[in-house]
Image (spheres, rainbow, N blue to C red):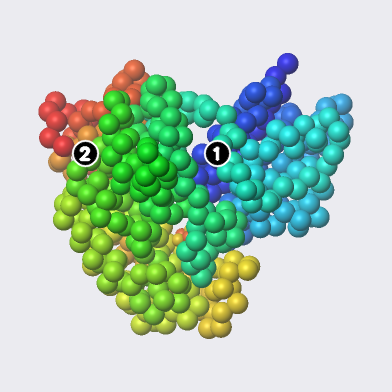
Amino acid sequence: MPKRVFIKTFGCQMNVYDSARMADTLRPYGYIVADTSNDADLVILNTCHIREKAAEKVYSELGTIRRLKVAKTRRGGRMIVAVAGCVAQAEGDEIMRRAPCVDLVVGPQSYHRLPGLVARAQHDGDTHLLDTSFPAEPKFDFLPEASAPGGVTAFLTVQEGCDKFCSFCVVPYTRGAEYSRPVAQILEEARGFLSNGVREITLLGQNVNAYHGRGPGGREWRLGELIRSLAEFSGLERIRYTTSHPHDVDDALVAAHREVAQLMPFLHLPVQSGSDRVLARMNRLHTADDYRRIVERLRSARPDLALSTDLIVGHPGETDGDFQKTLEFVGEIGFAQAFSFKYSPRPGTPAASAEEQVPGAVKTERLAALQLLLTRQQRDFNSAFVGRTLLLLLEKPGRYEGQLIGRSPYLQSVHIPASADRIGEIVPALILSASVNSLAGSLAAVETG
Ligand code: SF4
């Protein structure tokens, strides 16, 4: 009888990808993916450490899992509980100490060893298994072939880890040094996705445009070359990549935006602050002017390009003047979308122990002002499409009967009346209305782009 694994994913798309790969590693050992943790034989929490209170969320979830585990034991069964991901990496020992229901903890770079750890927990009765090492062998070399994503869009991790060490960020400590997968491995995975009906691939990496994989003939390929190569695959209609760093936007990538039609004109390019003083304190390796120049180059290559970004308010040392510069910068670049957060200290990062921490009330006030501006810009961006035609990739059923949700080139969700058999098609839609978070439209007769 197959065993059931329930995987709960917290955080970013990279964790979504990792969870799918964890399921891939377990499938040959008889595990099928379950929709709920009730009665699962194995529960994995794939955690994220980027946002505040991440660890608290994990402990609270573990409280629920513990009750399910006790109930299953009473029925004569066995539930193995695993914690994976960045909280596991950062707080493995603490998790073991505070949550005795956890049998094993595995870091983001060692989850290819999951089947062995699960077997030890299951057959040898070992508990308190901890593997948060950064193995010399890249895990991708040991993972089985990625299974079909089950939709028309797919994430594909091409790069992991980061060497940038921004003052506020835990990624270099939890995911380790920058690593790029070999070109051949990526192309093979993409081919597999396409043969299963995928039409859009988002290339993932913590610092995706730092990609530098070994290409044919041993030559080093950067992200721009990888995108060009993928664009030659028949059936791949759309390519995206995230998350990028301004410092690594090179000429080949700008040229890819100019010349590769499948590369969508929507780019997530985190800036974090509009003040050079704060950017220097953040160790961001770019100034506001550098960012302006990059955006100019990208927009001259692809005039219809829209940008989203990440912003942090209240980094240690941020003054009212610095914050004002961020507001002005946001307006000047005209971001179509953004993720904005109050700075919150991550233990072990340089900013956590910096002096001049900004009081909580000031951070709250600044975030509210910034989000007001961002919401207005996002609404204006969406409203500008009313009366125009956009090409949509029809992705999934909407909330109502006879409705589908499609994605525009700018990643906007667009609700349109259409039958489910059209999922996977790219269709022109006339946009009839817009709100901050989505658009509504109807199928249009002519493609106008
Ligand atoms: S570049 Fe991104 S992932 Fe790397 S340290 Fe900075 S914020 Fe973190």
The residue nearer to you, when weighing 176 against 400, is 176
In the image, taking residue 151 as reference, residue 253 lies left or right, namely left
On the image, the x and y values in percent for residue 351 come to 54, 74
In the image, taking residue 102 as reference, residue 45 lies left or right, namely left
Q: Is mark 1 within 8 Å of ligand 1?
A: no
For label 1, the residue is: 140
Residue at image x 73%, y 34%?
A: 116
In the image, taking residue 2 as reference, residue 153 lies left or right, namely left
On the image, the x and y values in percent for residue 94 come to 76, 57
Identify which amino acid the numbered label 1 is placed on.
Answer: Phe
Within 10 Å of disc 1 (Cα), the crowding (few <14, some 14-19, many 20+) is some
- Classify mark 2: helix, strand or loop: loop
Q: Is residue 34 visible?
A: no
Rounded to the nearest angstrom, the CA distance separating label 2 from label 1 is 29 Å
Q: Is residue 163 visible?
A: yes
Residue at image x 15%, y 40%?
A: 388
- Report the quarter where the N terminus lies: top right
Mark 2 or mark 1: which comes first in sequence?
1
- Classify mark 1: helix, strand or loop: helix
The residue nearer to you, when weighing 372 against 191, is 191
State which mark lies toward you, 2 or 1. Answer: 1
Count up the numbered dots: 2
* Residue 409 position by quadrant: top left
Identify which amino acid the numbered label 2 is placed on.
Answer: Ala
For label 2, the residue is: 261
Within 10 Å of disc 2 (Cα), the crowding (few <14, some 14-19, many 20+) is some
Please tell me whether residue 121 is drawn above or below residue 359 in the rendered image: above
- Report the quarter where the C terminus lies: top left
* Residue 23 position by quadrant: top right
Residue at image x 34%, y 41%?
A: 226
